[in-house]
Image (cartoon, rainbow, N blue to C red):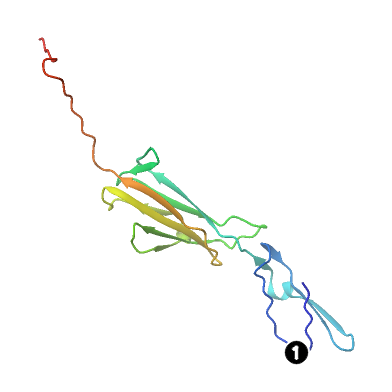
Amino acid sequence: KGYTITGKFDTTILIDNLAAGKLNISVRAIDNLGNENVSDLGMNLGNIYIDNNPPTTELNVSGPETGIGNDTYLTVSSRIVVSGNDGSAGGISSGFKTIRYQVDNGSYIDWDYSRGEVSIDVSSLSDGYHRLSYYGIDNLGNVETGHNFEFYIDNNPPQSRITYPDGYVNINN
């Protein structure tokens, strides 16, 4: 797009709809007599990059885990690990900043990703159904669509017993 502005001016150019990548901005000024001044703002301001893509997160479980049907079962010695990646769109990435997560209906916790992936301790959770909600945020505030991980905590050992119908047990020494 080109813009024509006459006289002294300050302007803002919206870059909302530009694709991710390196942006070169140049300004060409021509006065009423035809005198021209061309400058490359990229040299004066540094490079301008567009990163309008959200980061991504990945969830893994370490420790005891099993699936029955569509349900996931963990024990209190399991750990849920969420890692993040800001990827690269057009060779540009502002970097991963924060993982926000919430266990059940508790408060959201902001994990500073400069500390690395987040390992979520489930040792204080009671037996039964739980839900972890989480998403990532990059350094420019791009927000990933949220995810939910639903699971059950089961710390009860199985119980077993053998029963025989009356008259069917004969023990010989």
Q: Is residue 100 above or below residue 34?
A: above
Amino acid identity at mark 1: Lys
Work out which residue is located at the far front of the displayed protein and give it.
Answer: 166
Identify the residue shown where x is 18% and y is 24%: 162
Q: Position of residue 17 (x, y in %)?
A: 67, 67
Secondary-structure class at tag 1 = loop
- Picture quadrant where residue 115 is located: bottom left
Q: Which image quadrant: the N terminus?
A: bottom right
Q: Position of residue 75 (x, y in %)?
A: 30, 44
Please give the residue where the numbered disc 1 appears in the rendered image: 8
Q: Give the left or right position of residue 167, taking residue 9 as reference.
A: left
Q: Position of residue 133 (x, y in %)?
A: 41, 56
Work out which residue is located at the far top of the displayed protein and give it.
Answer: 173
Identify the residue shown where x is 38% and y is 63%: 108
Asked whether 32 or 83 is in front, the reply is 32
Q: Is residue 172 above or below residue 3?
A: above
Q: Is residue 32 above or below residue 118?
A: below
Q: Is residue 7 above or below residue 132?
A: below
Q: Give the left or right position of residue 142, taking residue 8 as reference.
A: left
Work out which residue is located at the far right of the displayed protein and give it.
Answer: 33
Q: Give the left or right position of residue 58, taking residue 62 as reference.
A: right
